[in-house]
Image (tube, rainbow, N blue to C red):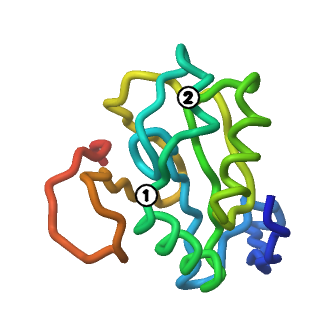
Amino acid sequence: MEKEKKVQLEELEQDGVKLSPQLPDGIKNYLIDIDGTICDDIPNEEPERMATAQHYPDALETLNRWFEQGHIIYFFTSRTEDHRKVTEDWLNEKGFKYHGMLMGKPRGGNYHWIDNHLVKATRYEGKFTDLIEREVKIQVFEK
C-alpha cells in the first residue's frame, strides 16, 4: 500500500464538545469500488480471477492524479477479508496509489448512504475522468 499522505483535519468544537473533524476545503474522501469500476468485474465466488483481472488505465491515471492532488483514496469493496492479500498485491502490482481498503461492502447495489457529513455519489458508467458538475434530482430528509 502507498504510504499515506498526511492531511491536516480541521478540529471542530461546539459548546466545548468535540465534533467529528473535517477535511480542508477542496480535499475529498473518495470511496472507490473495485470490481467493474477500476477493473474487470470479478465476483467473490471466483477469487482465482482476482489476481489476473485487467485494470482500466483511465481509472489508474485518474485515481493516482487525485492521490497526488492530496485527496484521500480508499477502496470500498464487496470483496471479503479473505481476498485482502490478493487485492492489495494486485493494486500494488498495477501501480494504484491509495490510503486503504474497506472490505465487505454489502453486495447488490442500490446503495443509499445516510451520514451526518456531506455525501456525494457518482455512478461509474464506463470511463474514469475528472468529475464535472451537473444538476440532478436527489432524495433528502424532510426538514
When the figure is inspected, residue 65 is found, relative to residue 60, above or below; the finding is below
Res 91 label: none
Where in the figure is residue 4, as x and y percent of width and height? 82, 69
Label 2 residue SS: helix
| Residue placed under numbered mark 2 in the picture | 49
Which residue: 52% across, 41% down? Answer: 53
Which residue: 75% across, 26% down? Answer: 81
When the figure is inspected, residue 81 is found, relative to residue 137, above or below; the finding is above
The tag earlier along the polypeptide, 1 or 2, is: 2
Viewer-closest of 62 and 108: 62
Where in the figure is residue 94, as x and y percent of width and height? 63, 59
Left or right: residue 18 compared with residue 33: right
Q: What quarter of the picture does the N terminus occupy? A: bottom right
The Cα–Cα distance between marks 1 and 2, rounded to whole angstroms, is 16 Å
Left or right: residue 99 compared with residue 59: right
Viewer-closest of 102 and 15: 102
Viewer-closest of 35 and 10: 35
| Mark 1, other Cα within 10 Å: few <14 / some 14–19 / many ≥20 | some
